[in-house]
Image: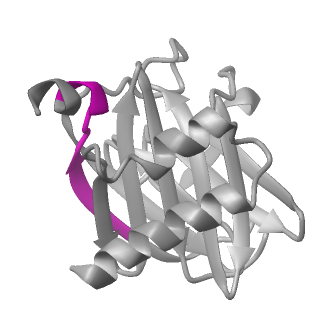
Amino acid sequence: MLRTACLKAFVLCMCLRATGIATGADRDALSGATSRGAVSLAVENFVFEHYIKDGRLHGTLSYPTKGWIAVGFKPVKRMKDANIIMGYADGDDFVVSDQFGTGTTSHKPDSAIGGTDDVLQGSCSEKNGVTSMWFVIPLDSGDEKDRKLTPGETVPVIFAAGKKDSFHFKHGKVASKKITLQDVNERTADE
């Protein structure tokens, strides 16, 4: 239990320290997420934590790689139709991208296939061989290349990691799991 709590704190700190994007309010919201009911999941060395607040999903993902990492929501089959958030860090620079599962084994940036990049905020860092990503996306962007997410809904989630800082290189590791999307506003009201 203590190991899990320490790992959660490490992931959040790594994601927030590496970015100048997160405002003070964002940092406060993310650092207090665990105590307010954020959902944490560890599967095959991927560590994913999320919570929903005010119509937005706040997420962190980490994996031991020096390459890219990705999380995808609501795929129909493998990657097909998933709303995929991908990121990598290259020195002080980073990329966080909104992608869409165009096939069972393919994806493209939303903006390249008639959609829009709907990552509202995000950053990615790499430290000691671990890549970590932090992002905020709307639950319903209105973009047909994004899947609508609903608080309380149980959805399939896919994870992937590559060995290089380029989305053109295939993943070396994948995993999947179902999660229930957790709304912090509802948890706070219930407590």
Q: Residue 24 in the image: state x and y as whole percent.
A: 66, 38
Which one is nearer the viewer's eye here, 58 or 32?
A: 32
User: Which residue occupies 65% across, 22% down?
Assistant: 115
Above or below, 143 relative to 17: above
Q: How many marks overall?
A: 0
Q: Residue 11 in the image: state x and y as whole percent.
A: 51, 68
Identify the residue at the far right of this view: 92
User: Which residue occupies 25% across, 38% down?
Assistant: 182
Q: Residue 111 in the image: state x and y as whole percent.
A: 73, 28
- For the question of whether residue 101 can be seen, the reply is no
Q: Quadrant of residue 180?
A: top left
Residue 182 magenta:
yes
Identify the residue at the far left of this view: 190
Identify the residue at the far bottom of this view: 128
Which one is nearer the viewer's eye here, 153 or 80?
A: 153
User: Which residue occupies 27% across, 25% down?
Assistant: 185
Above or below, 98 relative to 145: below
Q: Residue 51 in the image: state x and y as whole percent.
A: 36, 41
The color scheme shown is one colour
Instruction: Classify residue 120 as left or right of residue 160.
Output: right
Q: Which residues are magenta?
A: 175-186
Above or below, 22 relative to 16: above
Above or below, 84 relative to 94: above
In what quadrant of the picture does the N terminus appear?
A: bottom left
Instruction: Classify residue 10 as left or right of residue 18.
Output: left
User: Which residue occupies 18% across, 33% down?
Assistant: 187
In what quadrant of the picture does the C terminus appear?
A: top left
